[in-house]
Amino acid sequence: MADMGTKEAAKLWGVSQKRVQDWCRKANDKRITQDKKGCPYHIPKDYPNPFAKPNKPTKK
């Protein structure tokens, strides 16, 4: 499985690297891994964007 770091995820998702790091720290997902505390996070490349805004239905 291919992984990406917080820098690559931030660029892909259009947010800051700090925001991705904070999200990884708080995320309760076993797919987001870290070798040990203080090491970079490993995020699957096919992980859905957690910062994407859900589409709102349009008013007619």
Image (cartoon, rainbow, N blue to C red):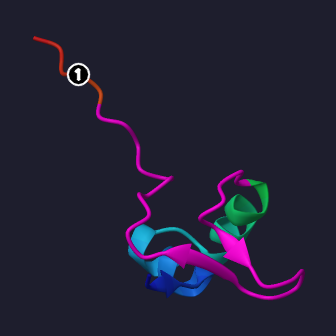
Residue at the location (78% across, 63% down)? 25
**Residue 39 in magenta?**
yes
Disc 1: which residue: 57
Quadrant of the image occupied by residue 27: bottom right
| Quadrant housing the C terminus | top left
- Seen in the picture, residue 50 relative to 43 is either above or below; the reply is above
Query: Furthest residue to the top?
Result: 60
Residue at the location (51% across, 84% down)? 4
| Quadrant housing the N terminus | bottom left
- Seen in the picture, residue 32 relative to 57 is either above or below; the reply is below
Residue 49 position in % (x across, y down): 43, 58
In the shown orientation, is residue 45 left or right of residue 21?
left
**Residue 46 in magenta?**
yes
Quadrant of the image occupied by residue 54: top left
Q: SS for tag 1?
A: loop
The region drawn magenta spans 27-55
How many numbered circles are shown? 1
Residue 37 position in % (x across, y down): 90, 80
Query: Furthest residue to the right?
Result: 37
**Amino acid at dot 1:** Pro
Residue at the location (71% across, 71% down)? 21
Quadrant of the image occupied by residue 2: bottom left
Residue at the location (43% across, 68% down)? 13
- Seen in the picture, residue 54 relative to 35 is either above or below; the reply is above
Secondary structure character of the magenta stretch overall: loop
In this view, the residue in front, 24 or 55, is 24
